[in-house]
Image: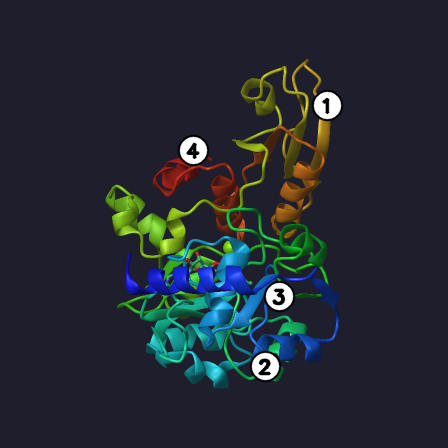
Amino acid sequence: MDSIQWLQVFITTALKGSVDLPTTCVIDDIAVAAKALCDGLLVAFPTETVYGLGADATNPFAIGKLFEAKGRPSDNPLIVHLSDLNCLPLAASRITPYAAQLLEAYSPGPITVVVKKNPRISDLATAGLDTVGIRIPRCEQTRDLLRLCDRPIAAPSANRSGRPSCTTWQSVLEDMDSRIDYVLKGAVCEIGIESSVVDCTGEYPVVLRPGATTLEQLQQVVPSTVDWHQKFGERGIELDDSVLPSPGLKHSHYQPRAEVRLVRSLSEIAQSVPVVCSKIAFAGMVDQDISMDSESREFVLFRRYESINQYAREFYEFLREADRRGAEVICLQVVPNAPLGAALFDRQRRAAGIPDSDSTNWRQKT
Ligand code: TXA
Ligand code: MG
């Protein structure tokens, strides 16, 4: 165990003896939320992507509580949120010129740039790395909150670790009631899947997690930008933990309780789900085939979306609703690689437990 993990264990053990969190309060006053964050408490808040679970990024005790509340592995670093570009020095110590260009072009918005960290950011928040992911959200309510806090706020997605992210405050409560202090009530998240995480510490930008700012958009500003999966897939390099550039990539993510299968069409359900399984949930696009062979199946949840944007916006809530309705199998129709398609596919395959090493193969088959 390294020193960061020891510190994590120490804080967690200390907290277990001393903290007994009361029921989580749902609030709509950002001043109350900001004061709580500055006092070292845990506050979930909306962003345009998904709800985040906030804690003061400079306070190791608050960060220790955050890891504990989420059940998050201590080696998975957190993203630090700022209210605007002028605050960058609060979290970063050095910024490459192309990182500045990407931030100028797409912030505030769904992009996280990984740069060298300011030592004020707790080492627990960055899992001992000397880099930090920085994001300036577009959601006005979030930015007002961050402005009032006047300090960097670490915020991973506000779900229990491994579960689908939350795009409504009600889903945050479902996962986090009695584990955190406050949930700041806001609207349903406008985009519905997380920011793109772009490593900006090397010679050129590398997309570690595809997100709502697409590879094409990034390449318009910095043409040398590459996608990490494509880079490794094309070179035929075996993906294992030793080559992962982001510790988060090795953990399971976005998984509902039901088993998830990826299908290309609705008719494929007949082949891939046994007839004995009666509780199926399905999500797909309206313009895809709707024939379902002769076998008729009962669906506990059946959703077809007009656009990839709508599919992405409602994706996590669909997975959660399928669980609430007791689905045994969730069938997700994979989407074309159109804008946002790559990001949505990434979440679909992780929900289905398909490893990084298989992602390029799967993509080529679709
Ligand atoms: O849209 C979003 O990004 C949301 C909202 C709340 O802002 N946040 C979010 O955080 O998705 P989280 O913790 O669920 O995902 C952050 C990802 C993880 O995969 C983590 O490993 C990676 O970013 N990450 C964070 N800091 C990193 C760093 N210094 N180097 C490499 N990867 C990093
Ligand atoms: Mg997450």
Q: Position of residue 229 (x, y in %)?
A: 35, 49
Name the residue rendered at 60%, 32% in the picture.
330
The residue mark sitting in front, 1 or 2, is 2
Which quadrant, please, contains the N terminus? bottom left
Q: Position of residue 100 (x, y in %)?
A: 40, 78
The residue mark sitting in front, 3 or 2, is 2
Distance from the alpha carbon under mark 4 to that under mark 2: 47 Å
Which callout, 3 or 2, points at the residue further toward the start of the chain? 3
- Marks 1 and 4: in contact by CB < 8 Å? no
Which callout, 4 or 3, points at the residue further toward the start of the chain? 3
Q: Which disc, if any, is residue 316? A: none
Name the residue rendered at 46%, 74% in the picture.
103
Distance from the alpha carbon under mark 1 to that under mark 2: 50 Å
The residue mark sitting in front, 4 or 1, is 1
The residue mark sitting in front, 4 or 3, is 3
The residue at which mark 1 appears reads as 298
Disc 1 marks which amino acid?
Answer: Glu
The residue at which mark 4 appears reads as 365
Question: Is the C-beta of the residue carrying label 1 under 8 Å from the nearest atom of ligand 2?
Answer: no
Q: Position of residue 97 (x, y in %)?
A: 34, 78
Residue 166 falls in which quadrant of the image? bottom right
Considering only vertical position in the picture, is 174 above or below 101?
above
- Left or right: residue 164 compared with residue 231: right
Which callout, 1 or 2, points at the residue further toward the start of the chain? 2
Residue 1 appears in the rendering: yes
Q: Which disc, if any, is residue 47? A: 3
Name the residue rendered at 68%, 21% in the picture.
278
Q: Nearer the viewer, residue 248 or 262?
A: 248
Question: Is the C-beta of the residue carrying label 3 under 8 Å from the nearest atom of ligand 1?
Answer: yes
Which callout, 1 or 3, points at the residue further toward the start of the chain? 3
- Marks 2 and 1: in contact by CB < 8 Å? no
Q: Secondary structure at mark 1?
A: loop
